[in-house]
């Protein structure tokens, strides 16, 4: 799936939300955030060096960030720079160009096995995988590796793929990237069927505008207050500079929710999920 570049309208919404936050309540300004969708891939390392990247994350007021990269070296550089802030996950890509081919590349298995033996992670992903490709040998081995270690799966996938992954491993914890880019009523239907599925809201502009939450998304948040979390998705290097603006935007609409619900989506859900993964025994 091709993700469109940030539109002027989308950036305008973010900037407007940031301005609203600057004049807003202390509750919004002080709301902790955990960003559940950050990439620090090879094309970002020189443009945004590790120290600068960590400074950006801290300036955004993040209490944690779930980070993956292509290849994994980026994640390890950030984790070394800020072990208190970075929560590593392992992406199966060694370069950006593998997004559409990794699931048929058997060399990915050795790469995953080597990295898993060398470093600690909470999950595997974010990976792009759709439909029946979930049952190919490489993804099946990836799921088996996650199962052996009790790791989260962070899937940029359609509904069919999510359900095929759960057939392979019914006890899997899956974080559904971008909530599948599905409409909120469809997201609710999938969440009802699968209690071990969580959703990030990265790179979505439909759930809120400024401090106003879309009613259909508000219904989803009310029904599943423990299953959503915010994310930025720094899939290109320049998006690193949007992290503080996105954090301001997120705080603006989260502060309009009841306190418990806003805090859950802002940081508590991500923290609860990660602690559950870290405490889970390996298969």
Image (tube, rainbow, N blue to C red):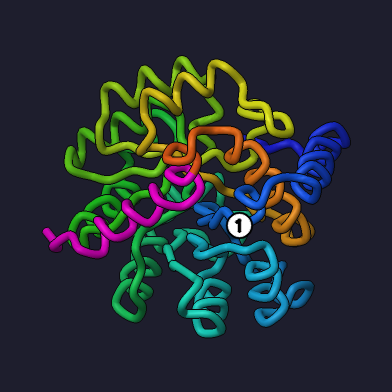
Decide if residue 191 is in sight here.
Answer: yes
Q: Where residue 279 sits: x, y (%)?
A: 20, 63
Decide if residue 156 is in sight here.
Answer: no
Q: Where residue 15 sits: x, y (%)?
A: 83, 44
Q: Against 278, is 162 above or below?
A: above
Q: Is residue 222 left or right of residue 213?
A: left
Q: Against 114, is 275 above or below?
A: above
Q: Is residue 43 left or right of residue 191?
A: right
Residue at 45 percent of width and 23 percent of height? 220
Name the image quarter holding the C terminus: bottom left
Residue at 42 percent of width and 64 percent of height? 90
Q: Where residue 236 sits: x, y (%)?
A: 72, 56
**What element does badge 1 sit on?**
helix
Task: Count numbered badges in the picture.
Answer: 1
Residue at 50 percent of width and 31 percent of height? 180
Residue that label 1 marks: 30
Q: Which of the pair 3/111 is nearer the observer?
A: 3
Residue at 14 percent of width and 62 percent of height? 282
Q: Which of the pair 198/4 is nearer the observer?
A: 198
Q: Where residue 156 sits: x, y (%)?
A: 49, 40
Q: Is residue 215 left or right of residue 244?
A: left
The boundaries of the magenta stretch are 263-283
Name the image quarter holding the N terminus: top right
- Magenta includes 271? yes
Q: Is residue 156 left or right of residue 24?
A: left
- The main secondary structure of the magenta stretch is helix
Q: Which of the pair 252/241 is nearer the observer?
A: 252
Q: Against 238, is 171 above or below?
A: above
Q: Quadrant of residue 74?
A: bottom right
């Amino acid at each position: 799936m091709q993700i469109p570049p940030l539109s002027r309208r989308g950036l305008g919404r973010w900037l407007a939300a940031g301005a609203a936050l600057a004049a807003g309540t202390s509750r919004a300004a002080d709301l902790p955030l955990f960003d559940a969708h950050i990439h620090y891939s090879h094309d970002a390392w020189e443009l945004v060096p590790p120290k600068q990247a960590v400074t950006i994350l801290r300036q955004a007021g993040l209490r944690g960030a779930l980070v993956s990269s292509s290849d994994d070296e980026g994640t390890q550089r950030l984790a070394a720079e800020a072990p208190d802030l970075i929560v590593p996950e392992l992406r199966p890509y060694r370069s950006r160009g593998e997004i559409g081919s990794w699931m048929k590349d058997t060399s990915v298995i050795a790469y995953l096995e080597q990295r898993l033996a060398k470093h600690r992670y909470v999950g595997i992903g974010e990976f792009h995988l759709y439909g029946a490709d979930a049952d190919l040998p490489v993804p099946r081995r990836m799921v088996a590796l996650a199962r052996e270690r009790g790791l989260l799966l962070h899937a940029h996938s359609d509904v069919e793929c999510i359900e095929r992954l759960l057939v392979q491993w019914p006890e899997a914890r899956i974080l559904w990237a971008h909530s599948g880019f599905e409409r909120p009523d469809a997201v609710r239907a999938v969440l009802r069927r699968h209690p071990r599925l969580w959703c990030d809201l990265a790179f979505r502009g439909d759930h809120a505008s400024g401090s106003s939450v879309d009613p259909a998304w508000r219904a989803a948040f009310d029904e599943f207050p423990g299953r959503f979390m915010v994310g930025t998705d720094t899939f290109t290097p320049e998006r690193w500079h949007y992290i503080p603006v996105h954090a301001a935007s997120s705080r603006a609409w989260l502060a309009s929710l009841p306190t418990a619900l806003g805090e859950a989506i802002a940081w508590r859900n991500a923290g609860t999920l990660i602690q559950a993964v870290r405490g889970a025994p390996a298969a």
